Amino acid sequence: MHEDAKRLIRELGLRPHPEGGYFTEAYRSRNRVGADADARSALTSIYYLLTGDDFSAFHRLSSDELWHHYEGSDVAIECIDADGGHRQLVIGGTGARQAAIPPGVWFAAHLTDAAGYSLVGCDVAPGFEYEDFEIASRTGLCGVYPRHAALIERLTRAE
């Protein structure tokens, strides 16, 4: 693992994320939005770190997510829309500095340099709750989007 990645894990208190990589929640708004039973924080934010050939597995949220690049290698975010369209967003030194992912879009992320690392921030509004988070089943996602099977197989974990 890259020495700067090890330092960031220590300094920021990062821990393994269920989708891959490392994270820590940096902010959770006290402001609440939505009806009583469905109320959630208006905004949440995490630090998220990818290292080496690790990846953020395909997943989707029911909220908007905004990624910000802080340091390290470029990050490619692979998005599959409900209609099966694929687009790649790159954030970092050679790409945009941030990228927005709409609700319901399947997306995964990986480094463009497998020898590197990248620290990003991810803001979710309305705020992140695990019940709004779905990690893709490799078999299920390939069944819905067979033309993207190679990408899905590369960026999901064995079932």
Image (tube, grey):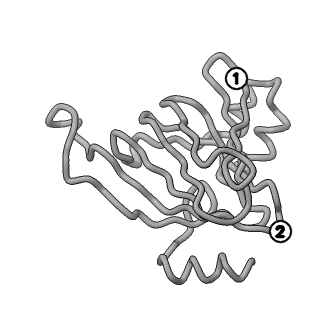
Measured along the vertical axis of the image, is residue 20 above or below residue 149? below
SS of the residue at dot 1?
Answer: helix
Mark 1 = which residue? Answer: 144
Q: Residue at x 73, y 61 (%)?
A: 73
- For this view, does 131 lie left or right of residue 105? left
Q: Amino acid at mark 2?
A: Ala
Q: Amino acid at mark 1?
A: Val
Q: Position of residue 104 (x, y in %)?
A: 51, 29
- Which tag, 1 or 2, sits closer to the chain's start? 2
Q: Position of residue 89 (x, y in %)?
A: 69, 39
- Residue 32: image quadrant is top left
Q: Nearer the viewer, residue 134 or 50?
A: 50
Q: Residue at x 54, y 48 (%)?
A: 67
**Quarter the N terminus occupies:** bottom right
Mark 2 = which residue? Answer: 115
Q: Residue at x 50, y 43 (%)?
A: 66
Measured along the vertical axis of the image, is residue 10 above or below residue 131? below
Measured along the vertical axis of the image, is residue 15 above or below residue 84? below
Q: Residue at x 69, y 31 (%)?
A: 141
The residue furthest top is 83
SS of the residue at dot 2?
Answer: loop
Measured along the vertical axis of the image, is residue 25 above or below residue 2? above
- Residue 113: image quadrant is bottom right
Q: Nearer the viewer, residue 143 or 74?
A: 74
Mark 2 Cα within 10 Å, few/some/many (few <14, many 20+)? few
- For this view, does 92 lie left or right of residue 35? right
Q: Nearer the viewer, residue 96 or 123?
A: 96
- For this view, does 77 lie left or right of residue 37? right
Q: Position of residue 43 (x, y in %)?
A: 33, 47
Q: Nearer the viewer, mark 1 or mark 2?
A: 2
Do tag 1 and tag 2 residues touch (Cβ < 8 Å)?
A: no
Mark 1 Cα within 10 Å, few/some/many (few <14, many 20+)? few
